[in-house]
Image: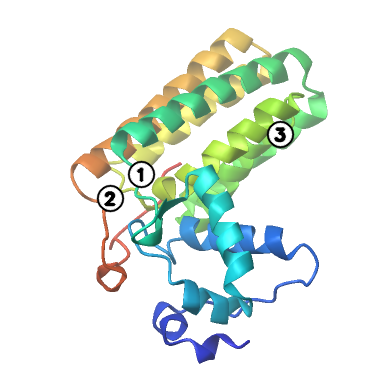
Amino acid sequence: MDIETSDTGRRQGWRRPQLKLTALHEELVARVRDMIVEGELPPGMRIPERDLCEHFGVSRTPLREALKVLASEGFVTLSPNRGATVTAPTVEMISQRFEVIAALESSAARLVCEHGSDALLSELKALHEKMNRLHGGHDLASYFAANQQFHETLVRECGNTILAEIHAQNAIHLRRLRFQSILFGNQSKHFLRQHERVMRALLARDSRRAQTAIQAHNRSLLDCVRNALLQAMIPQQLPDAQTSAQPSGSVPLT
C-alpha cells in the first residue's frame, strides 16, 4: 500500500517501503527498528499501529509480533493501557551500554593486536585516514559513517563472533545519540587524536596500549553524551509525537 494513504506517513515524511514477501517478520522488525534508530519514531512516542500497518501494507498481527521482538531488544515498551511506545533511554541506561561497548572494543583491540592479519590492519588504517580526510573537509555525515565502519570492522574481524554479536546489539542503541549529540568546544579534534592513538597501538600490535586508548575514547564519548543529556540538549521524554523535533545545530560524535 502506498505511504500516501497514511496521514501520519505524510506528516512524518516516511519513505515508501518495499517489503519482501519472504521473511516478512524479520523485515518488519528491521524496518521499524531503523525508524526508531533514525528518529522517525522518536523516544516516548506511542507507536501508531494503524498507520504503520497502512505504511507497510500488513495486518496488525505481524506488526504486533515485530513489536514484541523490539520490546525484547529494549527499543519498545509494551503497556496494557497505552499499547507500544518507543523506549526513552535514561542516562543510566546509556552509561551502562557505553560501559559494555568499551569492554567489548577493548577485547576486540587485544584480539586484533594478537591475531589480526596485516590486511586487516591495513583496512583499519585506510578507514582511519578516510576519517581524517572527511573531517578536514567538514563532511560530517560521511565522517560519522566512516567512523562507524572503523569500529564495526575492528569488532567484526577480531575473531570472536559472540563478542561481535553483543557489540552490534548494544551499538545500535547508541547510534542516533552519538550522531545527534552536540560537541562541546572542539571535541571532534580531541576524538581524532584518540583515534590516532588507537591506530598507532594497533599497528604496533601493542595490545595493552590499544586497550587503554580505546577505553579512553569511549569514556570521552560517554562524557559528551551524558553532558548533552543532563543539559537537556537531547529530549529524553517526548510524550506527544506531534511535539517531537530534531535538535537544531546537531553535529555527529566520532
Q: Mark 1 or mark 2, which is nearer the start of the sequence?
A: 1
Identity, as a three-letter code, of the amino acid under mark 2? Gln
Residue 135 location (% of width, % of height): 48, 48
Q: Nearer the viewer, residue 91 or 206?
A: 91
Disc 1: which residue = 89
Neighbours of disc 1 within 10 Å: few (<14), some (14-19), many (20+): some
Q: Are marks 2 and 1 in contact (CB under 8 Å)?
A: yes
Q: Nearer the viewer, residue 68 or 187?
A: 68
Indicate left or right for 184 with 210 as reference: left
Callout 1: SS: loop
- Quadrant (top left/top right/bottom left/bottom right) for the N terminus: bottom right
Q: Which mark is residue 236?
A: 2
Identity, as a three-letter code, of the amino acid under mark 3? Arg
Disc number lying in front (3 or 1) = 1
- What is the C-alpha distance between the residues marked 3 and 1? 26 Å
Disc 3: which residue = 156
